[in-house]
DNA sequence: CATGGTAATGCAACCGCTTGCATAATTAGA
DNA sequence: TCTAATTATGCAAGCGGTTGCATTACCATG
């Protein structure tokens, strides 16, 4: 049987409460007593039971990370998992554990309730999709941070996101700087959430008089190829595509090459998100880089601030950078 | 304040232990009493406190997943995160939570000790890298499963892995079937762990008289290109490359195309692991597909079996499949 | 109708730790 | 040297459940 605080206390010749005090570093304890207690703990290979600790103190030493069930799909995976690693990193440094749960309902109650009310985590990281007024009310002033900007129904939430608008503008400006003139947005389907913001950035960065051209792809790379090619057929054909994601860019690139369009000569291509393989296409893809590690890190930091004093309520946008590669190197 | 079991008991006019019994579904309770209790729970929006439950019952209702700190790197990410999602899925279905921790030491003790001895998880999923005799001894008959085959120092461990040997053989056989004759293995660096097994499968599947050709790449795509090209220069040049991973394949493909080698005409290419983008290269990559979701699922299932009755000790190899695409379509 | 047996519920100790309050020990000030 | 103010430690009551044992209620049987 594992040693308990009582065993340690007995061996050290003190009261369990004293052991508890040295454990928590609160209150004052004689150096000698402290030494004895440490010795006893070492001798018994004592590990404080964090379950008991949680129950007694009301603090669980754990945070919950809710994952949008839909993010389990291939392309969101890496995006999310890098953030998750970063979150765990920060949590570990703070002495916290990370409990994950997908947002699908769980035995009747939602993951959020489950983590908050049953598992008693000290804070929550939520995906934007779950942030609805009803949820916000339920959460109340419980410490939470949304990883990603919620849509308008999530007003008042505390979140961290990447600046999609700025990222799109960055791409458009780069296109112009490289001499491209007619820039289309490829993959503007279901314009909610981050796509909406990217589109906004795209539109606002277009030169005056330039009409926005938003192409739907249906989310598949084949669709991207088709959409890009048919746009090129039309009058007023674009000479650059800002792609909503890597798959879109891959699909478009493949389609363009098949029809012998020169990239970057005739047509420029930029992908949102910088997937590891974007560097190895032919030509390598210029990409709007999102630092997902930092995204996770910032989110976790903010959460811990909120755990410490609930007052904090901040919305953070993280800047993106442009990784310039061959697919836009026209000069 | 959240309602406790006592509040429910009082409202339902029964003893807390009776409430506990309906909660756990053990022992018999009058339908009427049960109904009253459910009503009281609903009225009070009662959520059993799982911390208190854990303390009293000795069961935490959580499993720990230890992540190799090194797996945080870009390419392992997706591989791992799909497994993780699957694990969470299974755990959720079983009413368990998933706590993640990276394998870096944590406040003195290892993640394993931390999760097992402090956080009191009911079971552990470990990465092969942590499985050393010392660890095994510490874990003892505590329920755990290794996600991935440990090397020889981890004898006796209970694990689930993909059959790397079979996967490599599958690829070699496919090459032969497509008329390739001299098959090289590209990316056989640091031949430990899974690479070693892939190499073994590669060697054993080579036709008699065929000499194995294992090329080192240094892990970079540039290295892959260089290694592939220089092998092609030599006498007895290979006409097919089995690539250790997607990046290697991407690098090689790019190098080959740059030097005007026809793929699949002159040279065939197969990548281990089927990354989502492998489908969108030019030509699309034939790949050995590893079902990482199933890997996670099987691992979790096995863990729960071990949690229920410790006797189970099984080593599982999951078969791979070959996704045939253009990069080997010679006929 | 008494009796034995089972089903339903209550009682109270306990899981391992925290913490407010009481007490004992120490130090300082006059 | 005596008293007051600190400081170090002990005591015991929780935290919110679970569970073995005791008790009561109920039913069937002889």
Image: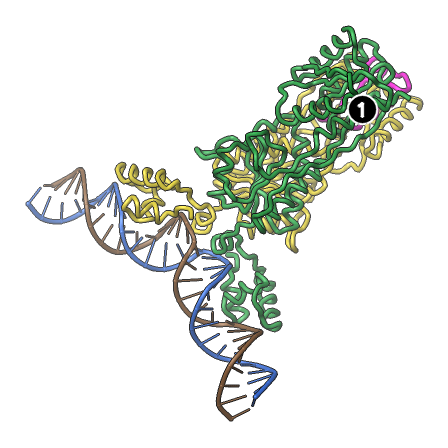
Chain colours: A yellow, B green, C brown, D blue
Q: Nearer the viewer, residue A33 or A104?
A: A33
Q: Position of residue A166 (x, y in %)?
A: 69, 26
As drawn, B24 above or below B260 = below
Q: Which residues lie in the magenta part?
A: A247-273
Q: Is residue A136 left or right of residue D8?
A: right
Q: Identify the residue at horizontal 83%, vertical 32% (top origin).
A: A220
Q: Identify the residue at horizontal 51%, vertical 64% (top origin).
A: B7
As drawn, A324 above or below A20 = above
Q: Position of residue A32 (x, y in %)?
A: 26, 37
Q: Nearer the viewer, residue A84 or B221?
A: B221
Check if residue A257 falls in the magenta segment. yes
Q: Quadrant of the C terminus of chain A?
A: top right
- The answer to whether residue A134 is visible is no
Q: Nearer the viewer, residue A124 or B220?
A: B220
Q: Nearer the viewer, residue A275 or A48?
A: A48
Q: Position of residue A146 (x, y in %)?
A: 62, 39
Q: Which residue is labeled 1 in the image?
A: B285
Label 1 marks a residue whose chain is B
**For numbered disc 1, what is the local secondary structure?**
loop
Check if residue B10 falls in the magenta segment. no
């Amino acid at each position: 049987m594992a040693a308990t605080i009582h065993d340690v206390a007995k061996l050290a010749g003190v009261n369990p409460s004293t052991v508890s005090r040295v454990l928590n570093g609160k209150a004052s304890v004689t150096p000698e007593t402290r030494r004895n207690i440490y010795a006893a703990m070492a001798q018994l290979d004592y590990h404080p039971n964090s379950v008991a600790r949680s129950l007694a103190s009301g603090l669980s030493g754990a945070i919950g990370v809710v994952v949008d069930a839909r993010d389990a799909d291939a392309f969101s995976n890496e995006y999310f998992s890098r953030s998750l690693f970063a979150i765990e990193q920060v949590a570990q440094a703070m002495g916290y554990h990370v409990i994950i749960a997908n947002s699908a309902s769980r035995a009747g109650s939602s993951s959020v309730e489950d983590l908050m009310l049953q598992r008693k985590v000290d804070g929550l990281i939520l995906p934007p999709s779950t942030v609805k007024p009803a949820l916000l009310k339920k959460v109340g002033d419980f410490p939470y941070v949304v990883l990603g900007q919620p849509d308008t129904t999530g007003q008042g939430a505390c979140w961290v996101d990447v600046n999609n608008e700025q990222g799109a503008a960055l791409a458009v400006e780069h296109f112009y700087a490289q001499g491209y003139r007619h820039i289309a947005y490829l993959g503007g389907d279901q314009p909610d959430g981050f796509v909406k913001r990217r589109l906004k950035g795209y539109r606002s960065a277009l030169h005056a008089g330039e009409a926005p051209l938003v192409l739907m792809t249906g989310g598949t790379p084949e669709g991207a190829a088709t959409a890009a090619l048919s746009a090129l057929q039309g009058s007023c054909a674009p000479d650059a595509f800002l792609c909503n994601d890597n798959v879109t860019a891959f699909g478009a690139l493949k389609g363009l090459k098949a029809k012998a369009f020169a990239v970057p000569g005739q047509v420029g291509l930029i992908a949102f998100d910088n997937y590891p393989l974007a560097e190895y296409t032919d030509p390598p893809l210029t990409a709007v880089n999102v630092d997902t590690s930092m995204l996770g890190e910032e989110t976790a930091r903010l959460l811990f601030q909120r755990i410490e004093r609930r007052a904090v309520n901040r919305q953070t946008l993280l800047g993106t950078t442009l990784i310039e590669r061959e697919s836009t190197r026209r000069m």
